[in-house]
Amino acid sequence: MQITSSLVSFVSVLWMTVFSPAQYKAKPVSCRLWAEPQIPEFAMNGDFIIGGIVAIHSYTNSGENTYSRLPPQLQCSGSMDFRQLRFARAMEFTIHEINNRTDLLPGITLGYQIYDSCSDVQMASKIALQCENGLDPVFNDTGSCSKLAAATVPAVVGDSTSSASISMARTLGPFRIPQVSHSATCACLSDKSQYPNFLRTVPSDQYQATALAKMVKYFGWTWIGAVRSDTDYGNIGMAAFLKAAQEEGICVEYSEAYIRTQPRSKLERLAGIIRRSTARVIVAFLHAPDMKFIIEELSRQQPPSIQWIASQSWIIHPDFLRFNMCAGALGFGFPRSVIPGLREFLLDLSPKNVSKSPLLTEFWESSFSCSLKGRTGSSEFLRECDGSEDIRALQNPYTDTSQLRTTNLVYKATYAIAHAIHGVICNETLCDKTIKFAPWQIHNHLKRVNFTTKNGYQVNFDSNGDPEAVYELINLQFKEDGTLDFVTVGYYDTTKPKGQEFKVISAVSWFGGQTEVPVSVCSESCPPGTRKAVQKGRPVCCYDCIPCAEQEISNNTDSLDCAKCPPEFWPNTKQDSCLPKPVEFLSWDDTLAIILTVFSITGAFMALCVTLVFYNNRASPIVRANNSELSFLLLFSLTLCFLCSLTFIGRPSEWSCMLRHTAFGITFVLCISCVLGKTIVVLMAFRATLPGSNVMKWFGPPQQRLIVLCFTLIQVLICVLWLKISPPFPFKNLKHYKEKIILECGLGSAIGFWAILGYVGFLALLCFILAFLARKLPDNFNEAKFITFSMLIFCAVWVTFIPAYVSTPGKFTVAVEIFAILASSFGLIICIFAPKCFIIVFRPEQNTKKNCTVKVPS
């Protein structure tokens, strides 16, 4: 359409400037435009004439173009849009109001020429050329028609549609005639490199597209349909919306274009797509006439349940209040306003003054279904108007001034031009109507205007010629009488701080009378504990919900990814939150710990009892014969061995970790050292009975104490080095179990631990070998046999302990170590001391020197 309008403009100028007969004659001639001028619908003379263009009719009837003769004249046809008629008359009213003011253009009378573009690009281009050249088809230029006459209007208000305004802007642009539109919202018109002289009092569709995307996102709709008018307004506006919607994560099931001039098959196809769609929300970026066709087509059958999201072009159009299918529709419209005095001006009509205007005559006859006097033969109405028609009782968009939205933009645009003219020809005291000025001067002042209208609205333009964007969120709701009405439920205001531009301030009525926000999604939301997985070949809004992997959670709806829990946490069963892992250690209240504690205390008590028995019978032969000093030291060390197992129970701490292993190592070495000393004494005692042997003098009590001390000090030295270099420490084992934490003592230096354990094993093995060698020595009470058996048990316990310790997890590792300590301790005390206690307590007759004497065979 832009190409068509530009072509018309170019051809018209070219015809006047190049192909005029004046190019072929030397003498002055009259230049004549071949096309008949378009007569203004409303006109008034004045010192300065302001042009106005509105789309009052829907079509033009130009006839068939054969390209062999001049094309037929464009004629408006189709139904009249009463709202557009109100816009035209609002411009009339505004100019009359300006002329009556003394502070704006004093002494200056503004005139106007207001045209009907018939929603047609060619007609708009023709009118634009007419604004440049005037209404007279014949002009003389002293022999040359190549020089164009000065523009007859300094500025133009209009057009109503974006496509027509684009064509006008390209036509008026070369002449630098400023154009102020009240309704052309195409974002493309903000491009000053293409449309340098275009301004508007209506916000760009870029703002509306952003606002619509934010609203769709706000209500949680991610799966929508999109329908647009196949015009600059619809195509560019929808492109801006789709871009904004993509940024908000909204998916579009389909995007279709339609214009009412297309074949009916196209309309039926579009209706079928809408009916079959799974999207319950449709964004309709359409001109009101196009939308009306679609609604009527969908109403032929059972209307689908659709939540309409409307562009401003039709959400405030009263025609849609009669379609119940539009109930619940949401869209952004311009703020409602009040223009004092406008209603009285609009209603100041009578058959007499109406008959002077063909346009008003058509309005009157269409509104009252009668023909004015003198038009009976040419009118479609059979009844003649009889004077009883009361325009004040008329209910139609022309007389309805309760929803003055776009009308106020016409009011602001007209005032802006008046202020610009005032800036050019007026100083502080008076205005000079004789001043000659060019249209570009008006444009320069237009860019800088900043004033407040009589009804309280601020008017100014940014660097792109656009105003600040302020919209009301309009909802079509049923009134108590069952009719639809426009209700403001929110706003979008770019003057608000970022993030606060959009706000819903009251309840929204949805389609079908629903009170809950309708749902329109391709896939249901993924609950916490799952993540979204996009379905192959489909938009990102269509997905499957996949449960999170082990050890992962998602605590938000529609999570794209699952997050791993921190190491010390574990997912709950729903995998929507992380819970602290249970900490496992051998606590005092654990059943296993209680049993081991009982055995430990029992062992220590047994050692104390044996000590008491030995102490009370310390003078008896059996006690004296078995080295009482080492026996008491052995009983003391066994008591410590039993009690050191208690250090392994309870929550590991820094001190308990260091104490448990060192106490175990030292007490067991002390214990084995005593046993080793007793074994050596037995062997040496046998050798001392041989004739001439004095070996016992080297293994008396001082030497026995030294043996025990030396062996124990070696273990103490190992423990000190271990604690100094890399001591044991408490740590949380997170690797052995995924679902719980094992709180245990780290070895620090594994070499230190195994050195302590190895040293104990070495002494036990040495003691076992020596005792084994002395097991068959002749004696009534040979202690070496019992030491051999006790060491056998000791070694067996600790040999089996090593693989059990390495393979047993968690608190059972500690339990195995305690069991080894207790088992080996019980083995020692029972094997070494039980036989002696039995004789002392139950066989005292055997507790004699004779029975304890070594008998050497001859």
Image (spheres, rainbow, N blue to C red):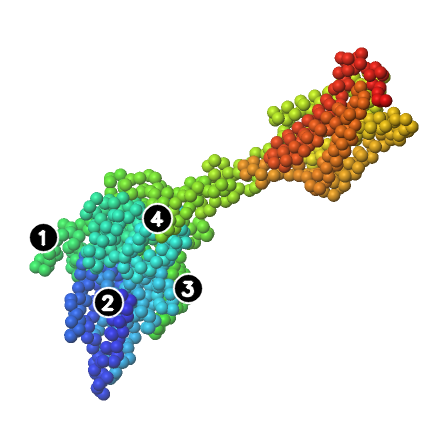
Disc 4 residue type? Answer: Trp
Mark closer to the chain start, 4 or 1: 4
Query: N-terminal of the two: label 3 or label 2?
Result: 2
Mark 4 or 2: in front is 4
Give the spatial CA distance, label 3 vs label 1.
55 Å
Mark 4, Cα crowd under 10 Å, few <14 / some 14-19 / many 20+, is many
Residue 24, image x, y percentages? 22, 85
Question: Counting residues from the N terminus, which is met first, the one under dot 2 or under dot 1?
Answer: 2
The CA span between labels 4 and 1 is: 53 Å
Q: Residue at x 36, y 52 (%)?
A: 537
Residue 579 image point, x, y percent:
53, 36
Q: In the image, is residue 223 above or below residue 22?
A: above
State the residue at coordinates (35%, 61%).
Answer: 187
Query: Which one is earlier in the sequence, the residue at label 4 or at label 2?
Result: 2
Cα–Cα gap, marks 3 and 2? 29 Å
- As shown in the figure, which amino acid type bears the numbered disc 3? Ser
The residue where tag 4 is placed is 223
